[in-house]
Image: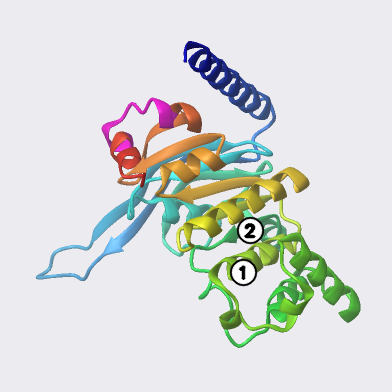
């Protein structure tokens, strides 16, 4: 028994050293995304009896960096501000935003139309709700081809279709799915289509917003492994948003824990999961199903 325990301890130490070495190697590069003192405010409710509107700060002075090839986890309970943060750095919000965000050295809040189109190509998102993010009246092939037409308008019909078939194969789907409608697919298959659509424009950076939370556990593992394989194959950089710290521990190099719009804990995903400092983080870990 002693030998097994010693061996297990040694393996854990080796694994921890490898993780630490990977994080050091990744963070030695120039950051791909830099966010500094980001604030997002929404106006709350209606004006009552002459009282002024109150502003709700959904994201409060958040700063972080994401390095090329890294997966940065963003965790917290529902309403903590993690999805609002992701929408803000994608420029998908029409509200008051303060602070700065730079992608590949460019200020994303001050882009001209040409630069904004390039940014939209380089930065993609995979949504939690795979069903509503796909047009139910469009066949799978056309869903993906629509993206290609927007960003590669010179692509011929034949080349466009071949590109879609390649993408389907890349995410573990078959050519027969090209002419299927979203409702004819399983949840896991629909999410694979969403991943293929995100990959269609050859992005550098993908925000994965709770991409497996609506899937069965067995399917979750398949999709997570697919995302890891794609990252290794194409050198992708991810922000991975989840409320499940066990999933973040599996997927991510580093982790940011959000509560009430603020980052309350940050560091190696492995280290935070093993030795959480904040009570809030401890509660999130305790909520992970056995």
244 w.r.t. 63: above or below: below
- To which quarter of the image does residue 44 belong? bottom left
33 w.r.t. 40: above or below: above
Which of these two is toward me, 258 or 18?
18
Q: Evaluate if marks 2 and 1 touch, with contact meaning CB atoms under 8 Å apart.
A: no
Query: Among all residues in the image, which is located at the extreme bottom?
Result: 137
- To which quarter of the image does residue 149 belong? bottom right
Q: At x 45% / y 50%, what residue is drawn?
A: 242
- Quarter of the image for the C terminus: give it: top left
* Region of the chain picked out in magenta, as a range: 272-281
Label 2, residues with CA under 10 Å away: few <14, some 14-19, many ≥20? many
The secondary structure that most of the magenta stretch takes on is helix
Question: Would you say residue 268 is visible in this rendering?
Answer: no
What is the x, y in percent for residue 155?
A: 87, 73
> Residue 276 lies in magenta, yes or no?
yes
Residue hosting label 2 = 124
Mark on residue 189? Answer: 1
Mark on residue 288? Answer: none
Of labels 2 and 1, earlier in sequence is 2
Which of these two is toward me, 73 or 1?
1
């Amino acid at each position: 028994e002693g030998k097994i325990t010693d061996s297990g301890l040694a393996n854990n130490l080796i694994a921890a050293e490898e993780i630490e070495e990977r994080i050091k190697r990744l963070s030695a590069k120039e950051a791909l995304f830099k966010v500094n003192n980001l604030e997002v405010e929404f106006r709350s409710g209606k004006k009552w009896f002459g009282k002024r509107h109150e502003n709700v700060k959904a994201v409060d002075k958040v700063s972080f960096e994401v390095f090329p090839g890294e997966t940065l986890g963003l965790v917290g309970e529902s309403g903590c501000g993690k999805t609002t943060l992701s929408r803000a750095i994608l420029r998908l919000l029409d509200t008051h935003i303060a602070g700065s965000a730079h992608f590949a050295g460019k200020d994303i809040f001050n882009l001209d139309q040409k630069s904004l189109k390039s940014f939209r190509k380089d930065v993609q998102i995979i949504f939690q709700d795979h069903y509503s993010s796909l047009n139910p009246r469009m066949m799978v092939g056309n869903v993906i081809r629509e993206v290609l037409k927007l960003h590669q308008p010179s692509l011929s019909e034949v080349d466009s279709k071949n590109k879609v078939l390649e993408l389907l194969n890349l995410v573990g789907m078959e050519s027969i799915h090209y002419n299927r409608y979203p409702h004819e697919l399983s949840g896991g298959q629909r999410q694979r289509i969403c991943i293929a659509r995100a990959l269609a424009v050859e992005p550098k950076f993908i925000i994965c917003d709770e991409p497996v939370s609506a899937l069965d556990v067995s399917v979750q593992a398949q999709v997570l492994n697919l995302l890891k394989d794609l990252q290794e194959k194409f050198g992708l950089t991810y922000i991975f948003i989840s409320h499940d710290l066990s999933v973040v521990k599996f997927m991510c190099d580093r982790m940011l824990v959000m509560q009430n719009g603020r980052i309350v804990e940050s560091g190696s995903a492995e280290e935070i999961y093993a030795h959480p400092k904040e009570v809030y983080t401890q509660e999130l870990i305790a909520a992970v199903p056995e």
